[in-house]
Image: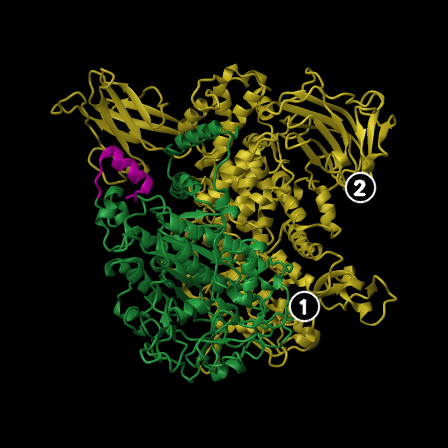
Chain colours: A green, B yellow
Amino acid sequence: MNILSRRSFLSHSTKLGLGAALASLTDIPFVMQRALAEGTIGQPGPNGRVRKLLFLFLRGANDGLNSVIPLADPAYLTSRPNLALTADPLQPVARIGPAFYPEVGSVAGTYSHPYALPLGNGFAALHPSLKFLAPLYNSGDLALVHRVGYPKQSRSHFDSQAYWETGAPADSGVKDGLLYRAMIESGLANTSPLTAVSIGSSLPLILRGSKAAMTNISDPTRYSLLSIPNTVPGNSKAAAALAAANAARFADKRERDLLELQYKNLSETLQLFAQLKFDETDNTFRDDVATDGDTDWANANGGGYYLFPTTAEKNGGWRRTSGNRADKYVVPTSAHEFFERLKAASIILNNTDALVAGVSIDGWDTHSDQVDPKNDTTGQGSHTGSHAGLLRRVGWSLYALQKYFTRYANKCRWDDLAVVTLSEFGRTTIENSDAGTDHAEASVMWVAGGNVKGFEPGSSGGVKRTGVWNCGGDGDRVLPWVTGPTGSMFRAGDRYLQRNTDYRSVLGKIIRDHLGASPEQLNRIIPGYTQAGESLQRGGVQSKDNTPIIGEPDVI
Amino acid sequence: MVIHIRTRRMNTVTGSVRSLLLFCLLGGGFSGWAEEGSVATALASTTVSGQIDTSSGQERIQLGFDPVPATEEYQVQFAPALDGIFAPLASATNGFQWTGPVGTDAAGFYRVVPRQLSTNELWATTLLYRVAYGPTPDEEERVRQLGPEAYLAEQLNAESVPETLDTVDATPRWQRVTVTGLGSSSRLYLYLDGPGDVYLDDLRLVVGTSDDGSRPNLLRNGGFETALGTDWNLSPNLIGSARSSQLVRSGNASLHLISTEGGETQGSSIYQVITPSLNAAQTYTLSYWYLTSGQGARLTLRLSGSGIVSTHGLSGDANSPAPLFSKLKSGTATRADLRAWHVLRAIQSPKQLHEVLRQFFENHFVTQVSKTQDYFDGRGYDTPDPEYLSVRTEFVENVRWRDALLKPQVTFLDLLTISAESPAMIVYLDTVTSRGDGNNVANENYARELCELFCFGVDNGYDQQDIVQISRAWTGWRLDILDPANEFNPLAARSTNYLNPNATGTGLNANTNVLGVWGLRYRADRHNSRAKYLFYNWDAKGNRLDSKKVPARFGPPWAGREYGKILPARTGSAGLQDGYDILAHMANQPFTQEYLSVKLCRLLVHDGFAHGYDFADGTTTPEEELVRSCMLAWENAKPQGQLRPVLQVIFNSELFRNHDASLQKARTPLEFAVGTIRALRARKADGTYTAETDGYSVYNFMNRAGRMRLFDRAEPDGYPEDAPGWISAGTLAERLRFVQSALMPAGMEGKSDAGASTRVDVLGLLQSKLGSAALQDPVRVTDYLLATLFPAEGQANLQAYREVALQFLNTADDGVTASPFANLSPGGTAHDQRLRGLVGLLMSTQRFQEQ
């Protein structure tokens, strides 16, 4: 028996009145889907607003050990003789300070604060490129979950990215994306033109599926059509003709459902996006707080740093009365395109019904040059180089998102938003001969948002919670610091940081407790989520590889 | 294939509309009245419904049915009884519906008989989509005559196809150029983009989209028969230009344009102010003749603003890749030049399969030219430009692949070796600085991707131990400046030819003072000289156990084979052999056979082939069977690993020849852009083509429509082959913009999307294929375009597009007012834009995304 495609299902069900009772929500007529959906994904909460999610995919595998650094681990220095950073001598153990750290050198375009920034738990520190995370961390809006992975970790970028995106490690039977399924569960995927959106070159697997189209916008400033003649009436004539042609029926072929869904999505979202202001001239979002100690520039220009550095002129303190200062860039100039996309994602989340938005940052496959020999004048390790530049994107992104959704957003505010980073695996604990690191296992996830449980001071001046998971010592009251068998995070003798938390536990926590999935929905969004052997929710020994994991970190 | 419906009047229905007799046939789930059980299979993808319609006041029977692939005509037949004789009724013309009168004996059986493309017709169209970058109007005709088998044989034996695209024709001859566009301004500029000279004659500018010589020339002294005077004004950089009576196309004189430096606007051109002024909304055609030469400068004739523009090299073919090839060979080409050369060859080459395969392997052995450029940038280069140096590495590996692919017995190992030796790869996956001497931990980047992406496929026959062992072999593979004679000798010393032989100190041996080419140079003192154990099993304590064996799932002849390999400790230059031994060992393992066979099947058949079939479990699918056949062809060839026997298996397979391959893939951005130009590119009587691009502007589109930056991919898996990797709302918007822009006349708002040099002459195409008499006939125009643009769809399946097209042709630009196409005069602006709009529309549809 032939399996009905969606297209043919639609044509038959409307024409012939076939009322098929099929298994999943997508096969129920659209008008009924929302009514039948469980949970509250996409439903306004008590504040009248809807909870949303923004993901940043760090493709290429982020070196977690050079992001949230286990500074006090005795094996750190010996494993990474060229990459290792040392603690800031000014504040060697104290909790992270303000976002202003003194710079050394003035290498154009390179932030060169050369010391790791201690997180105050006596063990972990942030890479200096992440200095702009200080305000988020200190206000308790940032959770850092280290040693994240999944059982039988694949060290292939492409397999591992696919597992993160499908939410089903090593299960090739799951073909659609984890957040796609979350949107299907919301019941809105086929009734709202926009549920999840990515800004990038293609729709990522995490948003792909066969029953509904999620949206991918390549360049928001070019999201419109041309015609011949290219006039207003000419365009509407062409659009009408194309719509008529798109309604035509054809024999089934492999890619026709996909084309039909995406053409439909294109026609439904063109108008929607045309009303949003994506142009550079509308990029006026600024931060009036003296950033990086640079009151000079903010005062001189009367508005402060731009949140989305999309051009050199809008990148940190580049423009000042005393001349251009490229060394005051907050991010490398190669990051402008990414911030263009991040800006679009933010505007969309705040101005449309989209529940999820995502942007990728590429280039994390740092097999070499984590120390930049040309610019490392201090001999102080990986504060320069390729990885440092990538981390600056993350640091400034989260900083800017907090400001944007606090100061400029109304439909989606910082409290309504969770930001999460994804990255397929971590990198070897021991550096290679190219001052780089190779493919390994566990890495780190950043979770940020007004709804996130991060650092929290204790009642008597101590620390109730550090906001750092799996990379902390005495200050971490919530979860124990779990070491590898030798007592070192680095498990001296091999090169692979072992995981202590499953990425699905972090995403599961967010999807249920932030987005509003019911436990049953979560079980469908992340297959097998509550199965005992997986230990994803409550922790225990994950049966697939007999590794103890902590279950859900309490980040929401 | 047959579709049945049983009709039976239902007397119980009352009311004005009596709907009844719905026998909806879904798959094989019915029984009892169909005549043959075997019919059920044919019904698997179709449904039929029927009803009696009384809305016209008269009872009529209506049948609806599902489309059947590649159907040219649906014939409805009727029989009063199942065992009776089915007699044809009138054909179904209204899409997938048929309406007819209810006879006195209404009970009976109807069937719909689709007439599909013949097996050979279908095979031929699929070949044009897979062997080639899509059909051209001329190739469709040629392959129809030649037959699919002969066409395939021709393309597989690319070395026997004559082709001179990269050869500059040095014999001077007069070449005509025609270009159409809007009259954006009344100033015409003539200039070269650098120093050089060219002869021009018989410039004409006329109203309309073509110039048959009957309309008046709007230019003064276009033949240069009289003194240049005030008709033609010379800017300082062109002040040496003059009339010539030595070399003339017609009459007694031509213009000898002599440029001392490049021009770009009125102040650096030879220009004429045209009187009376042109109309900015009117379409004009500029034509001229120039004397070809081998010079590198490019000639531009254009109106001020963004109307008519013509820019091309001087080789005689306006968009010949030959000058680009010369530039690439001389090491002075940019990335843009390289990509333009690649695109022009993809459009123009008669060796289409050769181009498709080269792109496949360039993408399989992916590298990133910007990373190579960074490498040279850090090594003291300013002159020559690091971009030139990095582009040369891409060019060299591609030329080597091209040459290899022209050998009848070319093997996968040949291509793999070229990739491994390429400086582009050595930089890309960090081999260049990897060290294995002393305590250095070798960089694993190349070793991992050699296993995962270039040979075996992910988690297929290797593990982390193997990657560590292999990574130690690729140490000491460095780059250096070599004497050109030693370019492919990794053991040669650094070149000792100097730009300034008298330089002293470190200046003598500085990179910028050493003459030669960058190539692989082996450094024994950086190599890990210890023994290496590949594809062995190890215990938890690190003791080596037995060899790995090919898993049972491969079945005979592969299952159970031991494929461990020990490389002895090697010192000195012998250590170089480690790498070559590994390549030779891996190239023909069943894992490599499987991985490459699946990738080729995905490229050539459809995306639904999987890795990891169990060939031994007693069950199979056509896809699994085809992969196994490919592997056997690979295994049994002597020498092993030849590509052509594998390709033969695919192209001759049942899967490829039937509907399972036809139109089952979405086009990548490269395939879409090249396919768009090719679909409209016919050769006209004067030797020019009805669709052209200079190759450069296509890159902008490919970058926007999914970041397909040819030769510059950051991720080592190459650009995807599957549709979801390319198709999203955002990229579709770019695709639609590209085709519309490509179809636009020069000067229209938005033309820059496809580039001013991307030019389509729809009228010329129709004129040469249909003749002048059909140019105002909307039906003939529509039918020709549908058949040309969608040759595999089946013309009966295109009825909805046909109706939309006719409506489009017969409606004014406001989309409302009736405006019969027959009333528009060919050559006029309205006729031109109506036609362009229609082709743009048809190419904006879902079906044009497929191949």
Residue B198 visible in this rendered orientation of the protein:
yes
Question: Which label belongs to residue B478?
Answer: 1
The image position of residue A297, as x and y in percent, is: 57, 60
Q: Secondary structure at mark 1?
A: strand
The answer to whether mark 1 and mark 2 are in CB contact below 8 A is no
Tell me the magenta residue range: A1-20
Magenta includes A13?
yes
Say what amino acid the circle numbered 1 marks: Arg
Asked whether, in this view, residue B506 is left or right of residue A198, the answer is right
Residue in the foreground of this view, choosing between B401 and A527: A527
- Residue extending farthest left: B12
Say what amino acid the circle numbered 2 marks: Glu
The image position of residue B322, as x and y in percent, is: 72, 42
Q: Quadrant of the N terminus of chain B?
A: top left
Q: Earlier in the sequence, mark 1 or mark 2?
A: 2
Which of discs 1 and 2 lies nearer the camera? The answer is 2
Asked whether, in this view, residue B456 is left or right of residue A168, the answer is right
Chain for numbered disc 1: B
The image position of residue B290, as x and y in percent, is: 77, 30
Label 1, label 2: how far apart the Cα atoms are: 41 Å
Residue in the foreground of this view, choosing between B390 and B461: B390
Residue B85 visible in this rendered orientation of the protein:
no
Question: Which label belongs to residue B261?
Answer: 2
Residue in the foreground of this view, choosing between B1 and A112: A112
Question: Which label belongs to residue A235?
Answer: none
The image position of residue B609, as x and y in percent, is: 43, 51
Question: How many marks do you count on the picture?
Answer: 2
Q: Is residue A230 above or below residue A490?
A: above
Chain for numbered disc 2: B
Which image quadrant for residue B2? top left
